[in-house]
Structure formats: structure tokens, C-alpha cells
Image: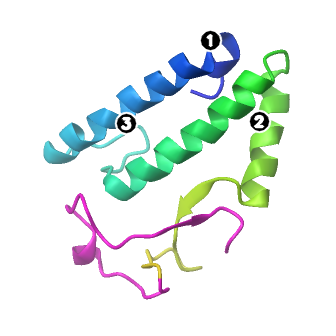
Amino acid sequence: VLFRSQRMKAKKALALGVAHEKGNYKRFLKKKKDEENSIQDSIATAMDLFNNEIGVMIGSSNKLLTKDSISEMIVRSIEKGDLLMIYRSPDGFYLDCSGKRLQSNEYERKWINSRCLIPTSVK
């Protein structure tokens, strides 16, 4: 969506991202994995929709920049905490919003679960 937003109107790029994310629930029900080899849930979908909006804003505001320059802008946005990520412990376990470690049965195969979104600058 990010690089497409350089070549098309922001509204259309956002619509493409939303259309892609809408399929997540159908893929979830069929237990189909996404391009990152995971099964999306409502938390991952919300994160992707939010991050897509930021990416479209960056791409549509910088139509003449190279992909490398845009990528650098995204990295800076990640470092500043402008994007969202799923909260994990330093050893990779998912955490709820209070910082409690989640057991896999608390989020696996559950569309709505206690995984938590946090700004990308939080570690």
C-alpha cells in the first residue's frame, strides 16, 4: 500500500489496504496463513489498518522520492513510535496491555483476544 500510494490517490490506496484486510476474517475462519506465515486476528488486522494509513500518508505526501528514501522515512516513523506493533516480551512472548504474558491458548485460534497494540518505539 505504501509504494502504491506514490502512484495513485491516497483514498484509492487506503481502499486497497482495507479490502485486503477485510479478507483476514475469512482467512482466519479457514485457518489460512498470510504472507508472513501467520493466521491474522482482529488485533493484527487493526494494527495493519492503522499502519497502512501512516504508510499511505507518507507515500502520497512524497510521490517523487525513491523507494529507498521512503523506506528510510518509514524506519524513522517506526523509531519515533508513529506506527503500532503487537506487544511482546523481550523473549518474544505475546503480552496483554498490562504486560502479563499470554499463554498460546489465550490468543491462538481466537479472532478477538487479549493481545495488545503499542507504539513501535516502546520496547
Q: Nearer the viewer, mark 2 or mark 1?
A: 1
Dot 3 amino acid type: Glu
* Mark 2 and mark 1 residues within 8 Å of each other at the beta carbon: no
Q: Mark 1 is on which residue type?
A: Met
Residue 114 part of the magenta segment: yes
Give the residue number, with chain letter if any, for mark 3: 21
Q: Position of residue 69 (x, y in %)?
A: 85, 30
The spot of residue 115 in percent (x, y) is 39, 70
Q: Is residue 49 magenta?
A: no
Quadrant in the rendering for residue 52:
top right
- The amino acid at mark 2 is Ser
Q: Residue 21: name its quadrant.
A: top left
Disc 2 or 3, which lies upstream in sequence?
3
Quadrant location of the C terminus in the rendered image: bottom right
Classify residue 47 as left or right of residue 64. left
Residue at x 64% of width, y 30% of height = 56
Q: Give the SS element for disc 1.
A: loop
Distance in Å between CA atoms under marks 1 and 3: 19 Å
- The chief SS type of the magenta part is loop
**Looking at the image, which residue is at 28% across and 69% down?**
107
Q: Name the residue carrying label 1.
A: 8
Q: Is residue 29 above or below residue 68?
A: below
Which residue is depicted at the point 82% across and 49% down?
76
Q: Alpha carbon of mark 2 to alpha carbon of mark 3: how far?
A: 22 Å
CB within 8 Å, label 1 to label 3: no
Distance from the alpha carbon under mark 2 to that under mark 1: 18 Å
Residue that label 2 marks? 71
